Structures are given as C-alpha cells and as structure tokens.
Image (cartoon, coloured by chain):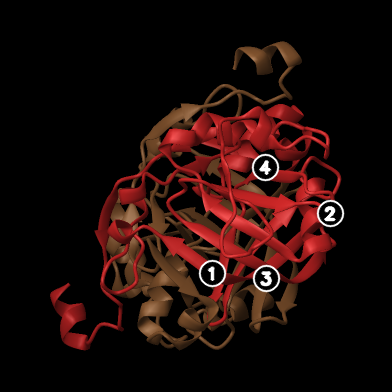
Chain colours: A red, B brown
Amino acid sequence: MATFSLEDINTMHHLYRINLINSCSGYKSANLIGTIDELGTSNVAVFSSVTHLGSNPGLLGFFLRPTTVIRNTYDNIKTTGQYTLNHIHLDILEDAHHTSAKYDASVSEFDVTDLEEEYKDDFSAPFVKGCPVQMAMEYVEEYPIKANNTILLIGKITKLYVPDDLLEKDGFINLSKGKVATINGLDGYAVPELKTRLDYQRPKTVLEKLND
Amino acid sequence: MATFSLEDINTMHHLYRINLINSCSGYKSANLIGTIDELGTSNVAVFSSVTHLGSNPGLLGFFLRPTTVIRNTYDNIKTTGQYTLNHIHLDILEDAHHTSAKYDASVSEFDVTDLEEEYKDDFSAPFVKGCPVQMAMEYVEEYPIKANNTILLIGKITKLYVPDDLLEKDGFINLSKGKVATINGLDGYAVPELKTRLDYQRPKTVLEKLND
C-alpha cells in the first residue's frame, strides 16, 4: 500500500502530484464546452469537472481556472450568457483531448480538429455534432473559490438533446449505449459498459437485518 | 432524437426528471464518505458529486442537500472537521448503494451492511476497509449555492492510501485496476476498463494542420 502524507503531497514533483491528485477523486465526466465570442469565433474545450447540482431546476456546475486556456470559455460565457455541453464519446477521444491545447482566442478548435460545430434552434453557442448528449446552457451564477482561486460556474439546462435509443422509459439516459467516455486523471479515457441499475433504497427492517 | 425544452423539463413527471437530469452530466465519481459524530456513531454515505478542484493544495469538493439523509454527513464534518473518501468498487456496489437509504443518525450504516469500518493513523473518521483509494480529508470551507439551496463543501486531502499495483510511475492511479465504479444517473453503476492515456496537447503547427 502506498501512503502519501500531506508533506509528501506538498513536496513531491509537481508532475507526479498533478497525475496523482487528478486521479484520486474517481472517474470524471467528459464534456466539451462550446462557446462563441462577440466576433463570431467559436471555441470548444474539454472539461472533466461538470457536476450535477440539482434536477429542479436542472443545474450543472463546473470549475475553471481563469488564468489558462479555459479563459476563452469563461470570457465567452460571461459575454453571451450561453454555452453548450456535449458528451465526449469513443469516436472523438483524440480530437476532444486535443482541445486542451492552449490556442489563442482567435483560433477555433473546430478549425484545427475534425470536431464539427452545429447550430440549433437559434441558440448562439455551437454544439458538437454527433455527441450523444447535447445541452444548451444558460449562465446562472458563479462563486470564486478562495481556497485555490478557481471559479465554480453554474448554469441551467435550457434544452436537452438525446438520441431515442439511449433514453429509457423512466428518463434514464443509458450513457454506455452512446459510447460516452469517462476520464481517469488528466489523460486517461475509458468507455464504460453499464453493469447494473440498483433499486431505490429504504432502511432495512429488523427482519431484513437479521436475514442479511 | 428526443428534444426537451425548458418547459418540458419543468413540467415532466418528477421521477422522470430526476432520472433524466441526473444522467445528463455524464459519468460521475462513486465515493463513500465516512464520518463520525461526537457520541462515536459512525456514518457512511454514497456521494456521486465529488470533484477535483486543484492539485496544489489537493482539494476536492462535493455538493450536498442539507435537508436529506446527507445531513448526518454534513453535521459530522462540521463538528469534527474530518471525513474520509473511499472509492466504491465492484465488490461492494450493493452495500455502497444501500447507504443512500435514510437511516436515523443513531444508526451506523456499517452495522446494517457488510461494509467494514477501518481506523488508521489516529484519524477520527472511519475509512471503508478494502476500498482501492482511501483519503483522509480536512474541512476547508463551504459555499451555500443560492440557485438551489445546496452546499458546496471543500476539503483538503491530508493523507492518501493507494495499493501499489494501481499506482503508475508518473503518479497516475489506474482506477480500472482497482475495479473502481462510476455512476450513471441515480442508480446505474459501471466498472470501466481504461482504454487509453493521451499525450499532453500543444497547439498544432501549420505543417501539422496541413497533414491532418
């Protein structure tokens, strides 16, 4: 068993730390965030921190560092109030990952990859064509995180597109049918197969505990 | 293609909405949070919102609703300042999922499941024995989220335990070697196989673009 103390974490090589700490939260969501600036230059960037906040209203959050490439995404969202979320899937892993490269704001990642932009229903921000889940998002609010100078940005789902064959009767989106990816650490990708859906859980009765 | 507008989302059956919106952020991390109260009653509960915030310091956040079963977790963290994060893996899926049942604070989920508590290195909160990644966490700060009355709770990793065979030379934790689970929606579980690790990305040169 490898054990890392706080001092070990603080003093290890920074590349080792980036890999270690990025892997240790568990599997991450794999999304492409699409935005557009005032001049009409589109932008698309990979994010692994998109997280469910609540269903009613449908709110999702993600974290960003304002001093990196992600700045384009943040600036565009602040300017337009709109962005899209698009699930990364098996067929676009390499191109999706490439959007982590630090391009100037004047370059659209759609022009330097095979990712295709798609505009729908008068929404200003570009969707990524072919992604198994696509969402139109509206900026709601943000929280500057004091502990490490990141920003939590929260948005509301205003439109959701899902292929019929991924959608089950009770509203469950079967991500594995869409070959949706998940991220391990900074650079590891997996495409999971759904194993099981488990029932809604209630406390066990005394009898159930005895028979357990 | 199924399309859901904001009005569709607002007016659909609440169970359908819970399944739909919980599935649409992508795959989620699958963690058990271990805590203990002042009377010595331990608590363990499944969370799917644990998210990486930064590597230096090693910070992780998660969202909770103060009005649900999760209240035990929150109260215990606020009282003791400590909690553990433990990755859910193939062998404990059912018991881990069962911790979502709403037990009274006087009941330890360790007593009503086969999950075993483990105490290490003078840390007050219980770890879940056998989990492939275990972390001792210290409370840092919290943010009340206005948009839906949830709380973002942020903690610092003060100790990290990983089996040697999951740890690669560069610090990457190979989650699939530990049969770590990921969550789809509220109740879907998958145990992914790592497909690939991709290189650090830099902008393409003009030549690379032409040959692409």
Q: Position of residue B130 (x, y in %)?
A: 38, 49
Q: Residue type at mark 4?
A: Ser
Q: Are marks 3 and 1 on the same chain?
A: no
Alpha carbon separation for disc pair 3 and 2: 32 Å
Which label is found at residue A38?
A: 2
Q: Residue type at mark 1?
A: Lys
* Mark 3 vs mark 1: in front: 1
Q: Are marks 4 and 1 on the same chain?
A: yes
Q: Which residue is mark 3?
A: B152
Q: Position of residue A90 (x, y in %)?
A: 42, 37
Q: Are marks 4 and 1 in contact (CB under 8 Å)?
A: no
* Mark 3 vs mark 4: in front: 3
Q: Residue type at mark 3?
A: Leu
The kind of secondary structure element at disc 2 is: loop
Q: Are marks 2 and 1 on the same chain?
A: yes
Q: Which residue is mark 4?
A: A5
Q: Position of residue B155 (x, y in %)?
A: 69, 61
Q: Residue type at mark 2?
A: Glu
Which label is found at residue A159?
A: 1
Q: Position of residue B182 (x, y in %)?
A: 41, 52
Alpha carbon separation for disc pair 4 and 1: 45 Å
